[in-house]
Amino acid sequence: MAAKEVDRISRSERILAPFQRRTSSGRYLPEIDGLRCLAVVLVVLFHSHGFFISGSEPSTAPELLATNPSTALGHLPHAIIGRGWFGVQIFFLISGLVLALPFAAHYLRGEEKPLAKNYFKRRLIRIEIPYLLALTFFLFLSIAIERSGWDRLPNYLAGLIYAHGFIYDGENNPLLFVAWTLEIEVQFYLIVPLLCRVFALPKLLRRFLLVLAILTVDHLCGGSWQAFTDSIWQHTVIRQLNWFLPGLLLADLYLSPNLKRIREKGGTLWADLIGISAWISVFILIDYHFTVSSRPFALLLAFWCVLASRYLGRVFRNRWITAVGMMCYTIYLFHNFFIHAIFGPHILGPVVTYEKGNWPINALIMSAMVFVIIIACGFIYLVVEKPFARGRVPWKKKKM
């Protein structure tokens, strides 16, 4: 290997070293951090989207199919970015998988049962402290730039206990409006130990019950919206449970001997082919509603193929991609600050000229925005999130 190549690799190693995940469980899946990267990039692009659309672009799959091929191709980046909100559902499935794995390993492999005390303590430190720091920062920022900033104090206090959606009838927190998903995550954390009792059942029965539960919840909450019409239900775990439950089913499939054999052989090419089709179908199915929805299962299949593939998995295991995935929580908390407080008023227009509806050029500008935001959030991650990433308070000495 040439000296320059060695130097390049060593520089990459030094840069990426602070952004690599360390785990004592031995169950780390780098592909999951790669999928976290996909999810957070989709969300950042989506929240940047409003600056660049004219409102007349074809957006949905039916609209694209109704236009001529050249027009459809030119607006395809806009249509993909416009679906970036779905990154949240990708996060929910990841949470279902990651949180269920220790419990599934206990019931299916006889491994040590996760202690409730350690489970909730880790969640509290890992999630709460960076969230508290971010929420407090945005409260003082609001006070600094608005005369009515102190009026946000009730929103701040409601956010601290992850109850803003309940107290304000489903309204997003004006200090940190993406926090609605964190409130749902916390609700899910509370019921995970109970849901994971399903792994104590025989294989066919537990998988049947999980599939039935996904179909039922998706029909009641995701498809028809008729069962829960009050807006507050849209901001509870019930409304999103159809995306968490596939994570439990994926945890079951991941621990199965079949997937283990496939991964030990380096994956299969057919999983690559099916996986690419599955990921495409996931974003097409967003525009279609059926009596029996296949969307959660399409996303489940897409995840499974990443874990079983030969080449697709390599993409999601790339160290630069997993590094972004590792700091996705920081990016998620702070990206709107950069979009709406920095890029919107000070860069888009005054520095970078652009034309609304000019696709795919606008997609290139947005990609550059995302790159800069990720770099900036990387520094914030080292201060705000990384010290608590392993679920421990760094300044508290470990008992001997």
Image (cartoon, rainbow, N blue to C red):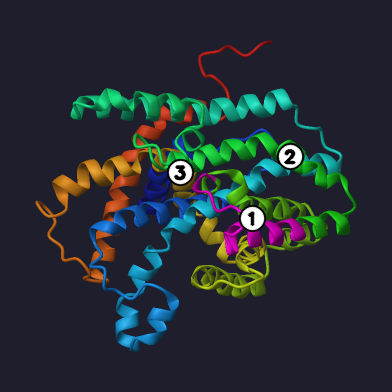
State the SS at label 1: helix
Tell me if residue 194 is in the magenta stretch. no
Q: Residue at x 26, y 73 (%)?
A: 56
Q: Secondary structure at mark 2?
A: helix
Label 1, on which residue? 242
Above-or-below relation of 38 to 377: below
Q: Earlier in the sequence, mark 1 or mark 2?
A: 2
Are the residues at dot 3 and dot 2 in contact (C-beta closer than 8 Å)?
no
Q: Quadrant of residue 65?
A: bottom left
Q: Which residue is mark 2?
A: 102
User: Which of 126/326 is in front?
Assistant: 126
Q: Image check: 206 left or right of 34?
A: right
Callout 1 crowding tier (Cα within 10 Å): few <14, some 14–19, many ≥20: many
The residue located at (48%, 58%) in the rendering is 86
Tag of residue 390? none
Query: Residue 237: where, in percent of width, then height?
Result: 60, 44
Which sits earlier in the primary sequence, circle 3 or circle 2?
2
**Amino acid at the residue labelled 1:** Asn
Q: Which residue is mark 3?
A: 328
Q: Nearer the viewer, mark 1 or mark 2?
A: 1
Q: Nearer the viewer, residue 218 or 201?
A: 218
Name the N-terminal-most of marks 3 and 1. Answer: 1
Q: Is residue 383 visible from the viewing direction of this image?
A: no
Residue 96's spot in the image, x, y percent? 65, 47
Image coords of residue 337 (percent x, y) = 29, 40
- Mark 2, Cα crowd under 10 Å, few <14 / some 14-19 / many 20+, is many
Q: Badge 3: few (under 14), some or many (20 or more) residues near its Cα, within 10 Å? A: many
Is 224 covered by the magenta stretch? Answer: yes
Tag 3: residue type? Cys
The answer to whether one can see residue 74 in this image is yes
Secondary-structure class at tag 3: helix
Per the rendered image, the range of residues in magenta is 211-232
